[in-house]
Image (spheres, rainbow, N blue to C red):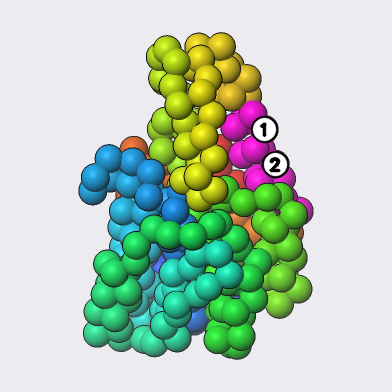
């Protein structure tokens, strides 16, 4: 049962296609707080952007009468708030998002497994992450949600440096999660890097399509409302 985003765009609320009448849903919004989410200028990191997306979406869903829960995760760990309805429910969500600090590695299947144990009802899932994990972990996450019969949306947050690679000259790059360092000439690797990123995003998009989940690219330089508007379209994936 898919969320009908076209109806949401027309009527300013979310529906499930099998119902004709308005229904209230349960939502689970998961935010990646791994070390790589800390990339970006102070106050404008990927995690800052993910927080804004999660807070805005939580507010909108609560306003329309749905029950919303949220979690922050890194590695295999997950801190979670069970779904609750009503406008006062936004306060603990905002507190949790505000206190989340980037740390640890990126992993999806472990935290999603734990979230499924908490959200036992038919909750729709929104995962906000840079998705910088291996493809096997990402596909396992999709398969877990699909097997549980959950609608899922992945908001893929990347910094413009990661997609445009507008560096010049020789740089030392450090993996924010492993600490591994490498020195490269940016000009020599730019074209190959950009192509690899495109292939990476295409692979994620295809995997989501195969498991009947939504993929929405959410560049951290765009207004936070932009990816949320995309959720009102009936497309199965968004490229930009």
The percent position of residue 73, horizontal first and vertical second, equals 48, 68
Q: Can the viewer see residue 124 in this picture?
A: no
Contact between marks 1 and 2 (CB within 8 A): the answer is: yes
Pointer 1 residue: 199
- Residue 37 higher or lower than 147, as above or below: above
The percent position of residue 154, horizontal first and vertical second, equals 55, 56
Instruction: Rate crowding at label 1 as few (under 14), some (14 to 19) or many (20 or more) other CA atoms within 10 Å.
Output: few
User: Residue at (53%, 73%) from the top-left corner?
Assistant: 77
Q: Mainly helix, strand or loop, the magenta region?
A: helix
The percent position of residue 153, horizontal first and vertical second, equals 56, 60
Q: Can the viewer see residue 135 in this picture?
A: yes
User: Residue at (73%, 63%) from the top-left corner?
Assistant: 140
Asked whether residue 205 is drawn in magenta, I would say yes
Asked whether residue 193 is drawn in magenta, I would say no
User: Residue at (43%, 60%) from the top-left corner?
Assistant: 103
Side of 155 where 137 appears, left or right: right
Instruction: Rate crowding at label 2 as few (under 14), some (14 to 19) or many (20 or more) other CA atoms within 10 Å.
Output: few
Q: Magenta segment range?
A: 196-210
* Disc 1/disc 2 C-alpha distance (Å): 6 Å
Q: So how many labels did they put on this image?
A: 2
- Residue 144 higher or lower than 163, as above or below: below
Quadrant location of the N terminus in the rendered image: bottom right
For mark 2, give the secondary structure.
helix
Pointer 2 residue: 203
Res 37 label: none
The percent position of residue 225, horizontal first and vertical second, equals 33, 50
User: Residue at (70%, 58%) from the top-left corner?
Assistant: 137
For mark 1, give the secondary structure.
helix
């Amino acid at each position: 049962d898919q969320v009908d985003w076209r109806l949401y765009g027309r009527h300013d609320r979310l529906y499930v296609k099998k119902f004709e009448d308005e229904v209230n849903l349960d939502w689970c919004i998961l935010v990646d707080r791994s070390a790589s989410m800390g990339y970006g200028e102070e106050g404008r990191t990927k995690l800052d952007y993910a927080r804004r997306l999660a807070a805005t979406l939580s507010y909108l869903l609560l306003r329309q009468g749905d029950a919303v829960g949220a979690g922050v995760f890194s590695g295999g760990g997950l801190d979670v708030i069970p779904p609750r309805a009503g406008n006062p429910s936004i306060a603990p969500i905002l507190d949790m998002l505000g206190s989340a600090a980037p740390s640890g590695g990126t992993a999806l299947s472990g935290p999603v497994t734990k979230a499924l144990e908490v959200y036992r009802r038919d909750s729709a899932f929104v995962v906000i992450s840079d998705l910088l994990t291996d493809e096997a972990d990402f596909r396992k996450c999709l398969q877990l949600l699909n097997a549980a019969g959950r609608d899922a949306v992945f908001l893929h947050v990347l910094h413009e440096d990661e997609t445009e690679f507008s560096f010049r000259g020789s740089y030392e790059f450090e993996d924010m999660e492993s600490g591994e360092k490498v020195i490269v000439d940016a000009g020599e690797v730019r074209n190959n890097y950009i192509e690899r990123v495109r292939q990476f995003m295409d692979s994620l998009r295809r995997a989501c399509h195969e498991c009947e989940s939504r993929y929405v690219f959410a560049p951290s330089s765009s207004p936070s409302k932009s990816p949320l508007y995309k959720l009102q379209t009936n497309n199965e994936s968004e490229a930009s």
